[in-house]
Amino acid sequence: MAEAGRDPDRWGLLDVGDGNHVYWESRGLPTGKPVLIVHGGPGSGRSRTAHKMFDQKVFRTIAFDQRGCGDSVPTAADPATDMAHNTTEHLIADMEQLRRHLRLDRWLLYGGSWASTLILAYAERYPERVSGIILIGVTMTRPREIDWLYHGLRLLLPVEWERFRAGVPAPERDDDLVEAYRHLMEHPDHAVRDQAARDWCAWEDAVIAHETQGNPGQYSAKPDAAKLAFVRICTHFFAHNAWLEDGELLRNAHRLSGIPGVLIHGRLDLSGPLLTAWELAQAWPDAELKIIEDSGHTGSPTMRAAIEDAVARFSVDR
């Protein structure tokens, strides 16, 4: 967490209600072009390096930890934390409350993976507050996308998927694995929750193990508390299809009209196949889709160059 002596205009814990306080921090030029960096997961916590993609003499970068993770409190790692107050609707409201708290008129939205779902949901709700969007590894968290990631990928990773399935008690192995893991993450025994979190992260790592140009192994490398929060939030959101109607974000893409966007997606992304990004690009004429041939979900040098190019486009007023 930020140090107690730091400028309160540059970081804080925002009271968003329901006993939740969302951690946020600001870097760069105070009068610069504002950009909100939205993290993935859900529940991964803010990136410590994403702000480096932006020229700190041009942009004002704002990062925050979504409810239950990172330096936001209370943490979802604590089984006493009530998950009923952690939904997509709550996160959209938190983002808008943070914008008002910082007295910003509009901001550029930047993020990847789950962040793209949350960014789209926010932008379709508040299009007048969005100056532009950069999405990396596009997802819309539709039921078919969740099913692919936790069931369909058995076609390509049968050994690893059977290990993932074996982490669930035998009576539930033929049911919805996401819901089964969600149930395990609510178990009163810490050892049960800890093992479920490890098994879930082992599967997530198996899906990106081939991404040698990116960042394989990142899920299991999380500290224990962060791992517990991440998996509890992931299973909570995915078991409920992120509280979004099937296809809702794609149907409402017309609300993004006039907002310039760049969609950057790796062709080798197993966890989030390219089709989702392509479908969004078809429905959002103001967005450009850039397909990165050598990248998976966690990136590559070529993808980084594409991100830098996208950021440069937004470094001037648009």
Image (cartoon, rainbow, N blue to C red):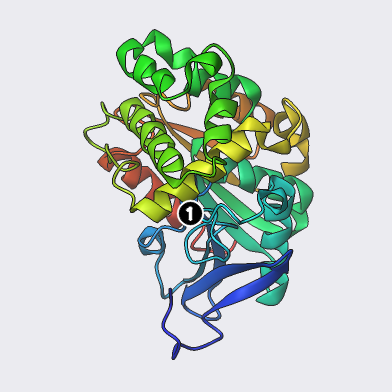
Percent x, y of residue 151: 50, 16
Residue 50, picture quadrant: bottom left
Residue 2, picture quadrant: bottom left
Q: For the point 37% across and 14% down, which residue is it?
A: 162
Q: Which one is nearer the viewer's eye here, 183 or 1? A: 183
Q: Which residue is mark 1?
A: 313
Q: Is residue 79 left or right of residue 86?
A: left
Query: What amino acid is labelled 1 in the image?
Result: Arg
Residue 50 vs 277, above or below: the answer is below
Q: Is residue 290 visible?
A: yes
Quadrant that contains the N terminus: bottom left
Quadrant that contains the C terminus: bottom right
Residue 183, picture quadrant: top right
Q: Which one is nearer the viewer's eye here, 174 or 45? A: 174
Q: Is residue 203 left or right of residue 63?
A: left
Q: Is residue 276 left or right of residue 304?
A: right
Q: For the point 27% across and 38% down, which residue is it?
A: 217
- Can you name the residue that lies furthest to the top here? 155
Percent x, y of residue 121: 70, 44
Q: Which one is nearer the viewer's eye here, 309 or 75? A: 75
Label 1 Cα neighbours within 10 Å, binned few <14 / some 14-19 / many ≥20: few
Q: For the point 41% across and 72% down, which residue is it?
A: 56
Residue 298 vs 18, above or below: the answer is above
- Can you name the residue that lies furthest to the left here? 212
Question: How many marks can you see?
Answer: 1
Circle 1: element type: helix
Percent x, y of residue 247: 72, 26
Q: Is residue 114 visible?
A: no
